[in-house]
Structure formats: structure tokens, C-alpha cells
Image (cartoon, rainbow, N blue to C red):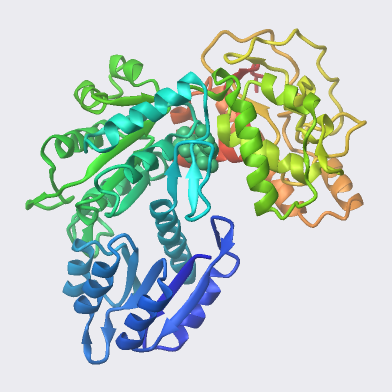
Amino acid sequence: MPRLLVIDDDRTVPLLVRKAVSGLEIGGEPVEVSAALTAREGLNLAKSERPDVVLLDLVLPGVRGSELFSTLHAADPKRPVLFMTAGGTSDTAIEAMKQGAFDYLLKPLDLPKLRELLATALESRRLMSTKVGLSAQAGDSMPTDLFVGRTESAVQVYKSIGLVAAQDVTVLVRGESGTGKELVARAIYHHGKRQDKPFMAINCAAIPDALLESELFGHEKGSFTGADRQRIGKFEQCSGGTIFLDEIGDTSLPMQAKMLRLLQEQRFERVGGNVTIKTDVRVIAATNRPLERMVDDGDFRGDLFFRLNEFSIDIPPLRERGEDVLLLVEFFLSRFKRDMGQTELEGIAPEAVDLLRNYGWPGNVRELQSVLRKAILHSTGPVIVPKDLPAEVRGDRRAVGPAAPLSGRPAPPPEPAAPPTPDAARPAAPPASEPAAPAGEPHRETAPQSAPAPAPEPPTQSGPPSDLRPLLDAALAENSEDIYADSLELMERYVVTRILDRTGGNQSRAAKLLGITRGSLRNKIRGLGITIEQVIGSDDD
Ligand SMILES: Nc1ncnc2c1ncn2[C@@H]1O[C@H](COP(=O)(O)OP(=O)(O)OP(=O)(O)O)[C@@H](O)[C@H]1O
């Protein structure tokens, strides 16, 4: 169970922290909070309870905050220590950040911010301490994530990790979304020389560019509107450790220039600063974008690409990994059986296995996990059978929208489109003979890529949700308690699909039109189960 230690002489702070983490799960487990009112008590608890994250008030009676921080940090340099300060950032706080503190919070504490930072720190700790094994055999003694696979391509990935892990060089991990790039990055870290130092993961697409720059490089006070205090960036904080830059293909050209210098010289300046700072970080980058093409189009710096590509690991999509699908199914079923307390689950029927084997897996391993989790929830007996699988896996094209895959398995023969119905605005419905999917379950929608589209068909899945009556009637009839969430999801799905349709599948343009970051858009696409891999004809306004 993830443990959090709060050290603060203010008794209300642990109460607030408990509130902030209530309902939060890290790696599927709730967070346990313990509290100390003095530095001595805090150090004792840190020793006896080995917390995963420490939240520390830097101003405690009779002790220097920086000393306390150093002692805690030295005892476990990989453990995130967050500290709290009143008012502006003090010199002590800046010093602690430079020495590797995870982040800081200003008092009075803001509950949502507190929850967000604690969740990030606890998750970061989980990533650092959950080793990644490279076979299907899990050791019971320590928490282990496994990169499962026995096919030639998986073995190639293991070999590459083995070759490069100890060499301390930059690595570029490539593969479609959900193929396991983060897992590979962590395996490199866990098998490398810096495994006793921190590992920090940054999703470059999830943070707007201006913020990303100060997140990575830090900034000086007053360097831009809103920069009311100095900030130490991840490249400085993580000196000695490893930084995982996910979605590096989504960074702007000026950011790429700064990153190139960092990779070449391990030097940088904070935003608005003129002092050159020396660091020592190992960079592992990942992308699912076609960097070569982006270089040709002028969207990615060629010199940065060559620097990153000195050692690259390509993870093939799941649909090209043959029997690994079966291995992954076995692995996840036994893991979920344990995690979800499904003791009565015995296995999966051969007909269902065939469907899983033949599906194209546009969302790769992540999608396989989600399909299996849902199948377990839908199953009514001890064995998973085809009806427990989502419609798209069963090959029911009406449920995946009037689409033809662009890649992966060949396009299935055309089927007549479902006639428009009054509830055209509802998410894809399962066939009448099947039980309705539970509220909130992602349904596949389609949005185009810039490839020739087949003949347009009626947008049965993405019609405007102008009339929510059918959804509301059905939800009321089922006594649903998720009506608000369902309606919003319907609306979001319609808007996102429609805008992607309009931009020909170009996510950057779509994000701009929607007024959200590319990262948020990507999260929405993922969360809503929208498949850009497929093509539909756009319906004109
Ligand atoms: N070979 C594998 N064996 C076991 N689990 C895997 C494997 N590949 C991926 N996973 C699991 O699938 C999920 C997605 O993997 P991960 O986040 O590493 O993918 P990714 O390529 O980084 O995705 P994205 O590009 O969307 O960030 C994770 O839960 C990961 O543990």
C-alpha cells in the first residue's frame, strides 16, 4: 500500500492531506497517511515506516528545514519529498529543489493542488520502485511490472534494452500508442547505472509549450507574467537521474533547440536567466510520431533527431506480435483475477481467444488490457466467452462506425450501414440481442486521417447530440446514476469526432480549433475510445 508521511507541527495539515488523498488509488491501492508533529518523530517514522512520499513543513521548531530535508533525501534519494512553505519561496526551498526535492506547495494549502501533487509524487515513486522484468515469469518477492512477450520482436526489444541500459546514452523508444514505450523506458532505467537515482517522466504533449519549458528548465522570478517566484526545472532537480521525455515529437522547434543543447552539453539556462547551469541527466525519449517525415516537413529538428536516434528501440504494434497476444491475455487475466478479486474466473473460451487474436488492436496493449478488464466485468460465468468482448473485437462493424481500417488487418467487406434512428446521437449501441454496455464504457468512434476515404456513409455514430431524450429515457429506465457523465461524454465524443473529421485527422489543428492542448486532445481521444486509424466520409455542415 502506498504510504505518505506528513511532517508538520500544525495538526490540521494531516487532516487536510487525508482528505486530499481520500479515494485516490496508486497502482490500484489506496494511500495510507501517517503524521509526525516534530522533526524527530518524523525521522523515526521515516525509518520505521519507509514512506513512499514525504510531505515536509520546512519551518519546524528547533530544526533547520534544509538539514531535515537532506537527511530524508540521503536516506532514500529516490523518495519524492514535497515540502510546504508559507508565502513566497524561501532560499531554503530553492536550495531543497536544487538538491532534488520533488516539488513544493504554498500555505495555505489548496486542496485540489495538494491532491494533484501528491498523486504525481506517489505515482512517480511507484514508477521508480516497481521494477520492470523482461519475461513472463514474475518474481513474488518484489513488486514487478513485466514486459511480456516471447516472439522474435519482443526478444529483439529485450536485447536492445540489455545492450543500451548500462551505457548511459540517450535512447529513443518508438512505437504506436499503447505498445509499451514507457515500460521499456523504465526497464532501461531499472537495468541502468542510475537505478538508485530518481526517474522522472514528463509527457511533453500534455503540457502547453510555455509551461513545458519552465517545467523542464525552470525559470527566474519575473521572467514572464505570472512568474512570481523562481522555479527549479526537472533537468536541474533530476541531476544524477534519468528523465523520460514522452511524446517528444510533440514539442515546438524552440524547445527542441534547447533540448539539443542539453543533450550535447548537459548545460542550459533557466527561462529568463543568464546563469548557465550544469546538470547530469540521462534522457530517454519516446514518440509515436513519424520523426523522419516531420524532419522532412520542417516540424522536427534534424540534428535533434540524429542525436536521439543514435540508439533507438522500435516496439512493433500488437497486431504484428502474433502469439504474444495469447501470452499477454494469460498474463493480464491472471493479474486482473487477483487485482479485481475475481477468484471464480477460470479462463477464456477458445472462440473468444480467436477473436482477440484476429483483432487489429489499434490501441495496442493498453487496449487489450481494457478489453480484458471489461470482459471480466461483463462475464456472467467463470469463463470469458465471445459475448463478453466488446462489439468491435467481435467484428460487429455497426458498433465501430461506418469505417474501414487504414492499417492493421485488412478492411472487412462492406456491410450495409445501420439506418439512421431517432437515437443516432447515442454512442454506438450493441446489437439488440446483446446486453447494453455499462454507462461510461468507451465506444469506438471514427475520425479520418489524411488518406483516401471510402464512400461516405451516414454518420450514425457521430450525429449531433441535439436530442438527448433517448439517452435520458434509457438511462432513467435503467435507474442509471451516471446520467450527467454520460451526457457530457456523448457531447465530447460528438465534438471531438466532428472536429477531427473537419481537420482530416490532424490533431494539432483540431486541438487549436478546440482551444485545448494536443495532450488533452490525445487524452480525450484515448479516453473516449476514438480511433483515428479509421476513415469515414465527413458530413458537411
Ligand atoms: N509487453 C507488455 N507486457 C506487459 N504489459 C505491457 C506490455 N506493453 C505494454 N504494456 C502495458 O500496457 C499499458 C500501456 O503501456 P505504455 O504506457 O508503456 O505504452 P506507451 O507506448 O508508452 O503508450 P503512449 O504512447 O500512449 O504513452 C501499460 O499498462 C503497460 O504496462
Q: Position of residue 321 (x, y in %)?
A: 55, 21
| x and y percentages locating residue 507 in the rendered image | 48, 29
Task: Classify residue 83 by image quadrant.
Answer: bottom left
Name the residue rendered at 48%, 71% in the picture.
Answer: 111
Whole-percent x and y of residue 354? 74, 22
Residue located at (75% from left, 7% from top)? 413
Whether residue 178 is visible to the viewer of this picture, yes or no, is no
Q: Quadrant of residue 458?
A: top right
Q: As rendered, which of 508 and 296 lies closer to the eye?
A: 296
Residue 200 lies left or right of residue 408; in this view the side is: left
- Which quadrant holds the C terminus? top right
Q: Image height check: is 412 above or below 137?
A: above
Residue 164 locus on image (x, y percent): 28, 32
Pick whichever, 116 or 500, lies toward us: 116
Q: Where 66 sits versus 393, above or below?
A: below
Q: Is 257 in front, or is 159?
A: 159
Q: Residue at x 35, y 32 (%)?
A: 161
Instruction: Find residue 492 and report its image quarter.
Output: top right
Q: Is residue 267 left or right of residue 103?
A: left
The residue positioned farthest toward the bottom in the image shown: 62
Number of labels in the image equals 0
Question: What residue is rendered at 61% in x and 39% in y?
Answer: 331
Residue 170, above or below 93? above
Specify whether 207 is left or right of 359: left
Residue 259 in sight from this viewpoint: yes
Above/below status of 59 relative to 238: below
